[in-house]
Each structure stands twice: as structure tokens, then as C-alpha cells.
Amino acid sequence: MRKNNVELILKELKHKKMVALVAPSFVADFEYPKIITQLNKLGFDKVVELTFGAKLVNREYHKKLKNSKSLVIATVCPGIVEVVNRNYPKYKNNLIKIDSPMIAMAKICKKTYPKHKTVFLSPCDYKKIEASKSRYIDYVIDYEQLREVFKTKKLENVKASKKIFDKFYNDYTKIYPLAGGLSKTAHFKGIIKPKEIKHIDGIKRVMEFLNKPDKKIRFLDVNFCVGGCIGGPHTCKLSLTKKKKKVIAYLNKSKRERIPLARRGTFERAKNLQFSY
Ligand code: SF4
């Protein structure tokens, strides 16, 4: 996978402006705000998180659900998309054509930082494949590879400066990498009844549902990995319970942070961009 060439990324970091796109699942493996210092020291000019992308994606699901009577299957997990396309062709049309938070944020980054190369930090191979197919993502590196790079470059124990992400903060979507994160943050009240929503994590259970669907479900929030993206194969070996605690702590910390307006994700930044196709 050409875009997943770590040596090339490190070489590019020496002479090109690069922006790191950090999914909120990063807290399972790395610390905040230390990761910003680590990435800056590695050569990244900008470091942004994907939580605002998640908010934009939620807004698209709102629009679709308002106008749809049939089952909507969320498409933020490319593993699910692949399994449905391959094994459940009758559900192909239920896969709603909405960008993942990664692609949504990559589009915003290309608009905001047109001269920068975009680099996505990935918890899994499915996301790496999705990133490698997108013209909005220039490079991708997974968490295991990044941990190794930090080790080699002796950046594991750097002291965190008081930095915050460069842009696009959004607090409540920090739970997106947990199972059910999408449906819990999408504010579907008034659009769909709670009993019409189902979240399932783990491909085995997802397939069980698709083999024997519950007809009253209208929105299926599904993850290939058990636990959601914190259970991604390139995340660290901590237990899911500990990883989940880290995500919740990150969410709670973010509620106390004072983020200037210029660093927050506002709809203005997404103006004229399309997130459904
Ligand atoms: S649930 Fe697993 S496969 Fe799907 S995007 Fe998250 S880490 Fe990747």
C-alpha cells in the first residue's frame, strides 16, 4: 500500500507541510495532549482531530433518516461495508452513501490547509484501505507503526507542552470510537424512535442480525470490531474496559477545556463541501 509507506512519510515530514488527522480512538493508545507534542516533534505542522467530522457525518444521517422509511445501515466502518457488499448484496442499497468522519475531515483539511499533505492515523487495516482509496488522504499510518516510530525517534517520553489541537474541536463526539458512539451522539430524538435504533459491535453479532433481522429497526449503528474502534486490530493490548475508561476520561476532560472559538469545529468551516454522495 503506497500511502502506508512509513519511510516515505518520515522523509516527506522533513521538507513538506503535513497535517495529522487523529481519530478519537487515539486515546486508547496515546495520551492527550502529549500526542500533539509528539507529532509536532516528528515534523507535523498541524494536528487536528476527527470529532468535528463525526458531528458533520451525524448531520448527514439526520437528513437521510428524515427522508427514509427503510433500514439505514451506517457506513462509518469500512469493515461493515465490505462484509455487506460481499455477503449481503440484498442490503447494498441500505448502506447509506455518507462519508466517514475521516473523509469528512480530510475534505475540510484540504480546504483549510490546501498546501498540506494529509496523514491519517489508523486503528485498523480497513481504515487504511479506505484512506488509500481517497484522493483527500495522502498518507496513512497505523497506531502500531506510530508507536514504533515514537520509540525509534525517542519521543515516547516527551514532556507534553500545554498544546491543544490546531483546529476543529468538538467535545461530545469523542465517544464515537465506542460501540454505539454514532447513535448516542447523533441527537436523533424526534426523527426516529429509540426502539428503532440498534447498535451492534463485533462482526459475528452483526452477521447474526443480518441473517435474522428485526423488522422494526430503522437505523443500524454497526462496528466490525468488538467494542467499536477502540477494539481495532492496531490498537494496543489494554482491556476494552480500560480503553473505554480512557475515552470517557478524555470526553470529561474536554468538557472542562477552554477551547477558543477559532479552534472549534463550526459549520462555517464545512461550507460548500459535500459529505454525502
Ligand atoms: S470498528 Fe474496527 S474495522 Fe471498523 S473502522 Fe473501527 S477499528 Fe476499523
Image (cartoon, rainbow, N blue to C red):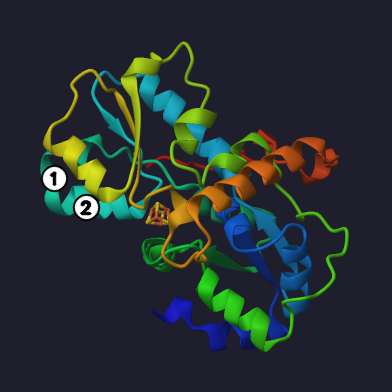
Q: Is residue 112 above or below residue 199?
A: below
Which residue lies at the image location 74% right of the left edge and 50% below the top edge?
167
Instruction: Name the amino acid type tagged 2.
Output: Val
Left or right: residue 173 versus residue 263 is left
Left or right: residue 48 versus residue 78 is right
Residue assigned mark 1: 88
State yes or no: Cβ of the residue under disc 2 lies below 8 Å from any atom of ligand 1.
no
How crowded pointer 1 is (Cα within 10 Å; few <14, some 14-19, many 20+) is rated as some
How crowded pointer 2 is (Cα within 10 Å; few <14, some 14-19, many 20+) is rated as some
* Ligand 1 quadrant assignment: bottom left
What x and y, as percent, mark residue 118?
A: 59, 66
**Total number of numbered labels?**
2
What x and y, as percent, mark residue 141?
A: 52, 73
Q: Is residue 142 visible?
A: no
Depth check: 125 or 203 in front? 203
Left or right: residue 127 versus residue 31 is left
Depth check: 104 or 177 in front? 177
Q: Residue furthest top?
A: 190
Residue assigned mark 2: 83
Which residue lies at the image location 79% right of the left edge and 46% below the top edge?
263
State the quadrant of the C terminus: top left
Q: Name the element at disc 2.
A: helix
Q: Is residue 13 above or below residue 244?
A: below
**Marks 2 and 1 close (CB-CB < 8 Å):** yes
Q: Is residue 207 above or below residue 19?
A: above
Instruction: Name the amino acid type tagged 1.
Output: Tyr
Q: Which mark is residue 121?
A: none
Left or right: residue 98 versus residue 271 is left
What x and y, as percent, mark residue 154?
A: 73, 85
Residue 63: image quadrant is top left
Whole-number angstrom distance, CA of label 2 to CA of label 1: 7 Å
